[in-house]
Image (spheres, grey):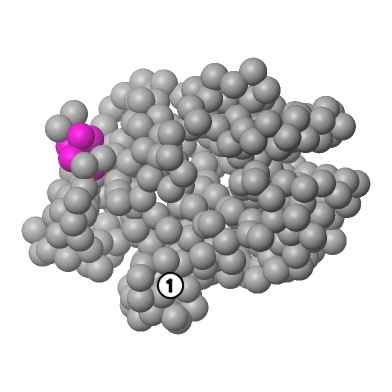
Amino acid sequence: MSLINNIFNIKTEQNFNDLAIEVFKFQYENNTTYQQFCKLLNIIPKQVTQIDQIPFLPIAFFKSHSIKTGDFKEEAIFLSSGTTGQNQSKHFVKDLSVYKKSYTKAFEQFYGNVEDYCVLALLPSYLEREGSSLIYMMDDFIKKSNHPKSGFFLKNEAFLIENLQFLTKNSQKTILFGVSFALLELAEKYKIDLSNVVIMETGGMKGRREELTRDELHSIYKKSFNVGSIHSEYGMTELLSQAYSKGEGIFETPAWMKIIIRDVNDPFNILKHSKTGGINVIDLANIHSCSFIATQDLGKQNAKGQFEVLGRFDNSDIRGCNLLIS
């Protein structure tokens, strides 16, 4: 428990680095799959003293293996969306309170107390399946907001617009979480002044519509909703933390999460700022699964540690997280 408490009380870069090394050694000792992966790479834990020496587990392992640190009966299993014929990623969650603490503290860091908001969710593709970590988070946010108009909107766009108009008229702080294609459909049907509403795109066209660049898509949203910027959330089934963008697709992470960009041709070569490569994620909230994940996303990072998502590796699976090509 003390390790978990330390994860959510990181104050400095050195705190993060020291804790990441501690988590690496803990997971090496207690996660059979991760240990086998490290051994194949001839990684000797006592020689790992810097985070750039830590090996990152390919995200595909969440489809083929049970990624567990320790032997436990999970409280929940989060499943990736997938498509027909695909294997789904499975994230075995030992303790849901760790996930709750992670997404609550991250939201508070970037947006303040969720109780101050009316929380609206336009997430049809997620609501129509089971095991979504995003739906779990949104359901909790809706309940915590304690606003009578907070809720999910599946097939009642007109009612959603009616609520948005009411909330705007009454100057209620409001945040609308929406999957990309559903926001696009809304933008094409309605022109409404949502200049005081936070529009939070949660990603993924998922083959529903003709592919649009992020800039093209956000331009449509901005024009129809009269907003200056589109916010975005970067998260996935295999992570218990999220990064947020307040505009222009520039993401920031909470203190216990870090992005590292790897060379696409040499995964052990870490790239300098402004270079495009594969996105590696350190998510220390993944204490009971694996905190060091090599995703199939392409991105680049600036000197401040902020990052952009630029697309996917060729032939990688389409996924429901924030993967718009820019």
- Residue 115 appears in the picture as rendered: yes
Magenta highlight on residue 280: no
Magenta span main SS = helix
State the extent of the magenta-drawn residues as a range: 3-7
Which amino acid lies under the numbered mark 1 shown in the image of this protein? Gln
Residue in view at x 36 percent, y 25 percent: 97
User: From the viewer's perspective, is residue 285 above or below residue 92?
Assistant: below
The quarter of the displayed image where residue 166 is located: top right
Residue situated furthest right in the rendering: 189
Counting from the top left corner in percent of width and height, residue 165 is at 78, 35
The quarter of the displayed image where residue 302 is located: bottom left
Quadrant showing the C terminus: bottom right
- Residue 63 appears in the picture as rendered: no
User: From the viewer's perspective, is residue 301 above or below residue 115?
Assistant: below
Q: Nearer the viewer, residue 206 or 32?
A: 206
Q: How many marks?
A: 1
Quadrant showing the N terminus: top left
Counting from the top left corner in percent of width and height, residue 17 is at 19, 58
**Which residue carries the number 1 mark?**
301
Q: Secondary structure at mark 1?
A: strand
In the picture provided, is 55 more to the left or to the right than 316? left
